[in-house]
Image (tube, helix red, strand yellow):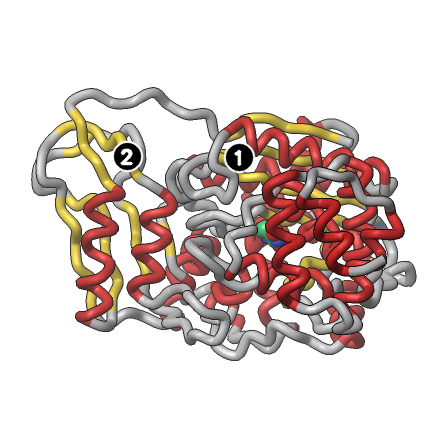
Amino acid sequence: MTPNGVIQKKRDGGVHTDEEIAYLIRGFLAHEITDYHMSAWLMAVYINGMTPKEVLALTREMRDSGAVLDLSALPGKKVDKHSTGGVGDKTSMIVAPIAAACGVTVPMITGRALGHTGGTLDKLQSIPGFNPLPSPATVSKILKTVGAVIMGQTDDLAPADRRMYALRDVTATVESIPLITASILGKKLAEKTDGLVIDVKAGSGAFMPTMQKSRELARSIVDVCRAMKTRIVVVITDMEQPLGRAIGNALEIRECIEFLHGNTPADLETVSLTLAANMIRLGGRARTMTQASKLAYEAVSTGAAADRFRRIIREQDGDERVIDNPDILPHAKHVEEFPARSKGFLTRCDAKLLGLASNALGAGRNKVEDTIDPAVGLYLKKKLGDPVARGETLCEIHWNDEKRLQNALPLIKKALEIKARPGRNRPLIHAVLEG
Ligand code: URA
């Protein structure tokens, strides 16, 4: 086998054997297959796709490219949740405490902002002192005592994915169903949980451009998990507009805390409780979705989930006072109101453009090494379908840097559209697949 031969086969629409995929991934890890070989192969996969058997072999190689966590000493079932990436998508900080409060163990491994989407780790790091990489001993202790930890990917977990993702990000090969499936599941299966809940986003702010593609991705994820004997629920949720009202790191943490205190936008509640209930069911704490939803709801209404979030923050060295006083989170120096130029109904609230606007303010990064401003972002006063009077505020812009504000304004202007009649309502939950 040669790198050239393997690339050529995929370029010409061939189907790889398991051995060819192993050769490629292991060779890449050993630096025998170079970044330019891998980039060419990624593009060939992007264009010609993979069979389900090839995706399975690739996922297995990604998982086995590094350490596999051993959580077998911990009591109870372990369940994690992952999202394919969205804007204002803050559900991880909500569902982990809810599921833990209901008796599920949640070893949540999460990522940073990239592209127009936000990153859970960046959001959590807006809490003063929060440690995203606790030691393995601390992780075990937190899981035993609190039931949930939210942490970054260590260097030894699925290292092939980290290097391949970095190449995909700069070679226009991110939006590929086989590559996304293997990337997400390579990491998630290395956690060796009993179950996974995956939130596949659909709409303007999702990586997948159409509902059809989001469904194909969901199907691909379910099929691989089934073959790997891991229980899985994939929920396809809407990402046409941002989820909830806040976009930006500290602003989103504030919204999560408000949620856990019982004050929440309806869309964030529906999506979060659906995901949490599925985690509770896969974690064996409820038999039906009705029971699981009731438990999830009670975890919020009794304050048990807020208490878990406080303990997660405390155990990961963050300032737990944030739960009672979110004002200690970083604040932007300026808050500017973005007004409606006409009256009518909000018919466009483009998640991708608003994510890019928030990044332009400094909330995200264009390159991995960029630093993030935790305080800046957007707060939507209006959501799709809302009636709007002329001059009324559509969103607040939390900003620190005049030049960045000027870069963000045209994106916000383009993202928000008002028409005389409201558009058709989109469902929040498009489909649920289980394997
Ligand atoms: N999230 C991942 O972890 N990998 C992808 O390829 C896309 C989203």
Which callout, 1 or 2, points at the residue further toward the start of the chain? 1
User: How far across and down, in percent of the image, does residue 337 sit?
Assistant: 16, 54
- The secondary element bearing badge 1 is classed as strand
Disc 1 residue type (three-letter): Thr
Q: What's the CA distance linking mark 1 and mark 2?
A: 18 Å
- Discs 1, 2 touching: Cβ within 8 Å: no
In the picture provided, is 251 more to the left or to the right than 95?
left
| Image quadrant in which the N terminus is located | bottom right
On the image, which quarter does residue 27 sit in? Answer: bottom right
- Read off the residue under disc 1: 237
The C terminus sits in image quarter: top right
Depth check, front residue: 301 or 138: 138
What is the x, y in percent for residue 103?
75, 49
The answer to whether residue 83 is above or below residue 187 is above
In the image, what residue occupies the spot 74% across and 27% down? Answer: 288
> Which residue extends farthest right?
73
- Residue ID for mark 2: 348
Residue 155 visible to the viewer? yes
The answer to whether 293 is drawn above or below residue 101 in the figure is: above
Compared with 163, 219 (above or below) is: above
Identified at 71% across, 73% down, the residue is 155
Among the 4 quarters of the image, the one containing residue 109: bottom right
Q: Name the kind of residue labelled 2 in the image.
A: Arg
